[in-house]
Amino acid sequence: MTAKPKFAMYWAASCGGCEIAVLNTHEKILDVDANFEVVFWPVAMDAKYKDVEAMEDGSILLTLWNGGIRNNENAEMAHLLRRKSQILVAFGSCACEGCIPGLANLSPLNEIFETAYHTVSTENPQNIHPQVSYPAPEGTLTLPTMNPVLKTLAQVVDVDYFMPGCPPESHQIAAVIDLVIQVVQGKAELPPKGSVIGCGDSTVCDECPRTRNVKAITAFKRIQDVAPLDPELCVLEQGVPCNGPATRSGCNARCPRAGAQCIGCYGPADDVIDYGARLITAFASVVDAREPAEIEAILDGIPDPTGQFYRFNLADSLLRAGKGAAMSRPNAITSGGKP
Amino acid sequence: MIENHKPKIGVYVCHCGSNIAGTVNVDDVRKWAQEKLGPEGVVIARDYKFMCSSLGQELIEKDIKELGLERVVVAACSPHLHEKTFRTAAEKAGLNPYLTELVSIREQVSWVHTDKAIATEKAKSLVSGTVQRIAYNTPLEKQKVPINANTLVVGGGIAGIQAALEIANAGFHVYLVEREPSIGGHMAQFDKTFPTLDCSACILTPRMVEAGTHPNITLMTWSEVTNVSGFVGNFDVRILKKARYVNEDVCTGCGICTEKCPKKVIDTHYEAGLGYRKVVYTPFAQAVPRFPVIDRPNCTFFQKGTCKACEKFCPTNAIDFKQEDEFINITVGNIILATGYDLFDAGRVTNYGYGRLPNVFSSIEFERLSNSAGPTGGEITLRDGKTKPETVGIIHCVGSRDKNFNNYCSSICCMQSLKFAHIVRERTGADVYEFYIDMRTPMKAYDEFYQRVLDEGTLFVRGKVAEVTNAARYPHEKGKLIIHVEDTLVGKQRRIPVDMVILSNGMEPRHDAKQTGQTFGISCSSDGWYIERHPKLDPVSTMTEGIYIAGCATGPKDIPASVAQGAAAAARVLDKILQKEVEMEPIRASVIEENCSGCRICNSMCPFNAIAFIGDLKVSRVNPALCQGCGTCVAACPAGAITGTGFSNEQIFAQIDGLLMTV
């Protein structure tokens, strides 16, 4: 029997939902096992980094990488798995565009640690503050060093394919797995390098069944303040900021179908260069007011513009990070709190 | 840029005499472009004292032919000035005009910087940006669209009347829209005009009548423009025709309704609050058109449901209480805005006491007071309507040349004040004091008029009046208005008791000028006046093609200047009409339909109504014949599915890369 192609999956700065999404393909996961030899998948099986290091370069056929690059451990693993893999896929929003962890790019590291360890919402009676190294009796213990900003996988290593979604939809994952199996069996060809896979080539609106009219928005509202939401009519037209118009299709417009606004987890559509900027100009364009004060009042209806427009995309946007974060030093981890 | 072919680019750096070369090291920019931008496709870089001269242009033409240049970058002045010059030159040499671009290193560099090293660096960055960008430029062809020969003139003051008559006399149709019941504007309220002292009505009314009866003029008074769409040559205009409650088709203008109307109200508008008018009225005897209007908020019938005196007595049954506001849509090729000015509200200068001290008059009140058709029949009296003043003080620059109000000079107030002095002395023999900061009498026969008023014995005090008060300090001030002023020529404080004070109010932009500007797509300066395309060389055009401005809408002016501007705007419009078609820049937006998911965000964006939604395909589409290339939809499209020629993502990002290149 010829050896099965090797498969790996790794989890960097992310929530773990992508891993669950893979398992959520149900019996399809058995196909992975049938067709691949899983050599490294910390969430599912025991393995050590040194095992990976020992592998031959290029010996893993497919690596699904989820998560952004937040610390030097993430970066080291990205380089390592890049070397060992033939096909490296940025899997899920964090790897593709930074996602929620990327929002931390608005704050310098010391502020992040200050908030996480020393504010009122944290119970920290011993005033613990993490250190990159600690002299324990058994020897020096170390932790990875945080980078000043979170980077996407492609900002750190060469990436072959991008698979968006927070997390990617299970049916899309299943389709991609099927495709790779067919490629392995010589029945299909891989798409061109750099392609965005496991998704559509249009926007969420394209998959959304709601009726759309000419838009004239006189107030932006939070969805809980619109009661009841018209089930037939475009969500944005009802004043709820829906990111569907700029967001890549592929989810089958799940949220708008369920009566909620699209928050943009599938990332920018093909021709969208800066996702947030696109949406900002689009929303501003349909504000129906002429007086500056009136316009201001309507725009104030979006209380958290970064969260609205860059929730998933900040680390991959043209801005990438706030100035304070971009200028902060990697070792800021030790400078903020008390030992 | 086609595939990997790097087009051959020529860079030409202009000295503009010392305009650019004084602040930018032109030679350095040229050398740098030749050496550092070589890899970007620059095959030749030259500098020349005046690139726009015929010799400079020939330099470019020669290089295009001999070196086979495919792109030309000229670093000189603003594209507004010479883009056309260089594009035409390149076209003569066989290069599509849109493959030539100007880099403004004069307006954006030499004129705004003083440090030569930094200015030179910035000039290099700008050149680099355009060199990077121009590689992606594609040849474009101009399009021609026919021009609608009808013209809309907004505002029926003297400037608008003049413009309308010029165009109508040339044989083209004009819609003259005025929001008051009659045309005539401010000029209809004046008694005499400076410096010749002609009777204002005598010179104005023939023009009004001509405009009212001209076969080529459709006069629409008591009407306002509410919406404008389209572009030069093809504007769609929506006009609100307010209900007059008088049927214009049958009204003869006999005036019986006005005579019989039992209710009088204070005329705050035409008579400046000094007289009364009936509720059904024409603003003044020579009003054009002659049809009256019913002042609905004050009409007894509309308030209480009874009266109808006008209806009963009207010999032609022209009164129509059921009339409603209506909207009229017209199509025109060009628009002239002659919307005039508002008089500065003298009450805002509280220390002059207007509105508090009865015998302080505004300039317009004095105009009505001195007008033989006015409330006193031309008698100059105090507020009681009887007493003749023995001493009169006239205060200049009320609301003008004053940091608290308007910085600008209202241009007419000196002459207006001199006219007032002359009239007061002529009719009452009173002593007249003029309080001025500087005397400004620069136009034809103006200074002679000043000399005349000086000779007549009017007393001139140079200084800004601090206060007008009725609080007497000395016995001889009792019962008088005291003008407190620093006489800067004598160098001391003076208190001059007078019976009457006339304030020479300045001019202000219309209170709704900004809103009107938005309707027509033109902008206002920080002072609020409409901005000319070029303050010296193109004073009646705006940055919006096909929209012209004339008269006081662009800034304070006297009557001759307003008339000249009205005629100038008309000449510009006739020029356009006679060309029969207008060349449109080929900058157009287009929808990449595969990427459009029909979200319809762009649908309401287009100021030219060029975007249509194709329901069957669920995509939006831009009509290239209507698109003006403004780029609004390109910016608005959330999916990036709309692209604009000349402003593709490749071009913009290449330009940014070029700008950020280390120089």
Image: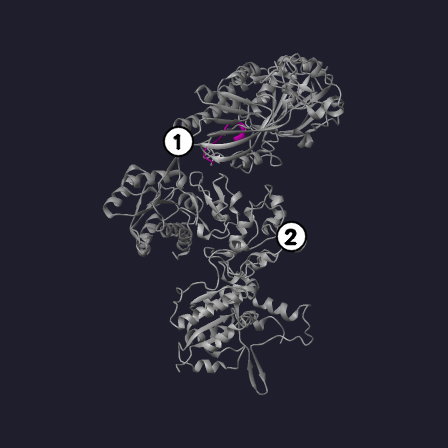
Image position of A1 with respect to B650: above or below: below
Give the CA distance from mark 2 to mark 1: 51 Å
Instruction: Kindly check if marks 2 and 1 are in contact, taking CB atoms under 8 A apart as contact.
Output: no
SS for dot 2: loop
Between B505 and B296, the one lying in front of the other is B296
| Chain under numbered label 2 | A
Number of disc labels: 2
Dot in front, 2 or 1 = 2
Residue B644 position, x and y percent, is 43, 47
- In the image shown, does B27 or A330 lie closer to the viewer? A330
Asked if the stretch drawn in magenta spans residue A107, the answer is: no
* Residue annotated with mark 1: B581
In the image, residue B191 above or below residue A79: above
* Residue at the outermost left position: B66
- The residue shown at (50%, 76%) is A30
Circle 1: residue type: Glu
Question: Looking at the picture, which amino acid does disc 2 mark?
Answer: Leu
Give the vertical position of B130 relative to B56 (above or below).
below
Magenta stretch bounds: B544-556
